[in-house]
Amino acid sequence: MKNVLFKKTLFCLLFLVSFIGFSQNLPLSKDAKISVLTCGLGNETYSYFGHTAIRVADPVNNIDYVYNYGAFDFRTPNFVAKFAKGDLQYFVIVHPFIDFMNEYNYEKRSVFEQELLISQDSKQKLFDNLNATLLSEDRYYTYKFIDKNCTSMVVDIINKTLNGSVITKKGDTDKTYRSILFPYFDGHFYDKLGTSIIFGTKVDQLGTKIFLPFELKNSLEKTTFKGHPLAGKSQTLLNFEKETPSSWWNNVYTYIIILAFVVFAKNKVIDKIYLFILSLMGVFFVAVGFYSFHHELAMNYNVLLFSPLLLILIVLSALKNKRWTYRFAVLHLLFLLVYTLFLINKAHFFIVLPMIITSGFVLARVVIRNKKRIPIII
């Protein structure tokens, strides 16, 4: 298997070098067309939001290649840590169009094409810019979920070629990034829940930037340049209906059942396990907020629910310090109230609400168990 992988990698590298050398300063013919490809959604984490690429096709020069800004290397040392930190290097690669299509046909994901209606000089300039990027340090970029990804990089190089901010977002600019993302997680409940609680204030800003492939597709349909449409009508190259996966565990029902068990069990041990899990998640959110360069993970107000201070409450309870256990439980009930009021107009309010209710019951029980009883004198 490793030998096969090595041969494929070597072949791709040799192809890339030969292609770049061939295409440098190659004049495109008048039959050349350059288009934006938008690829459909998949059920793997990396494919939830679709994909964007640029196709250059010139039958006279026997060119039909796809420039892809979404490549990364799983073999990068400390891959997961680098991705979490936000300094993982993505890069642009080029594929033969037929190979690109075969991959999406195999994955049963749709592909749509929008030809750019630009002058011959602009086509040549864009082609030259794409090839220059392949030969420079600009080939690599540090991935950012909203600000720098396969879609935003395509927008940037087209705008650079056209000498201005020609492509801007059309529609949904009154929605937050969080609201825009929510529908993409259909069928992936715990991914939706996870992103809801790990993302901070940045995703609650209005989504004025193009950062998703279908946002670019929709914006291109409404963009004009020099008095005419920038792109032609979308053509469907591959058409598949996205299959929403079903799972016995990855759904809202298991989520509700687990939380209901915690509420109705009324067990001290279960309450402590629940609070311990929340506190560990809070420690993780705080740590990743300081550690990561991803702005989306900073300023995470969800720590009001997933409070690291719950660890202190658990320790105080284990030491049977009823006074301070009571005080910390009351403090966290206040955190919960503030969190609920702050969250009430946010997109993820209803998905987090069951956890808010569960935490309220558990903390109230802790308060009642540790409240100092007032002696009754008869």
Image (tube, helix red, strand yellow):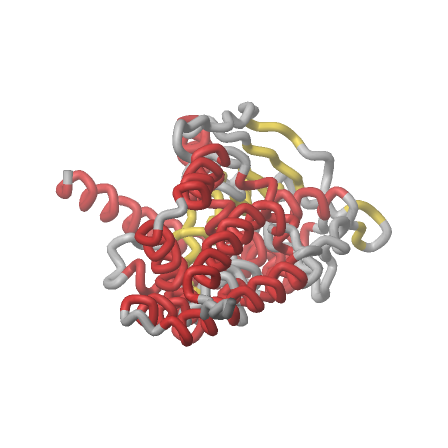
Q: Is residue 219 left or right of residue 10?
A: right
Q: Out of 185 and 354, give the one closest to the viewer.
A: 354
Q: Is residue 82 left or right of residue 43?
A: left
The picture places residue 356, in percent across and down from the top left corner, at 54, 53
Q: Is residue 62 in view?
A: no
The number of numbered badges drawn on the structure is: 0
Residue drawn where x is 35% and y is 48% of the image: 267
Residue drawn where x is 65% and y is 43% of the image: 30
Residue drawn where x is 50% and y is 61% of the image: 305
Q: Out of 42 and 177, give the one closest to the viewer.
A: 177
Give the residue furthest to the front: 378
State which quadrant residue 91 falls in.
bottom left
Q: Is residue 368 in view?
A: yes
Q: Out of 239 and 328, give the one closest to the viewer.
A: 328
The picture places residue 378, in percent across and down from the top left corner, at 51, 67
Q: Relative to 279, does residue 114 appear above or below in the rendering?
A: above
Q: Relative to 75, does residue 41 appear above or below in the rendering?
A: above
Point out the image quarter for the N terminus: top left
Q: Out of 195 and 368, give the one closest to the viewer.
A: 368
Give the residue furthest to the right: 227
The picture places residue 234, in percent across and down from the top left corner, at 68, 34
The picture places residue 52, in percent across and down from the top left corner, at 54, 46
Residue drawn where x is 35% and y is 62% of the image: 280
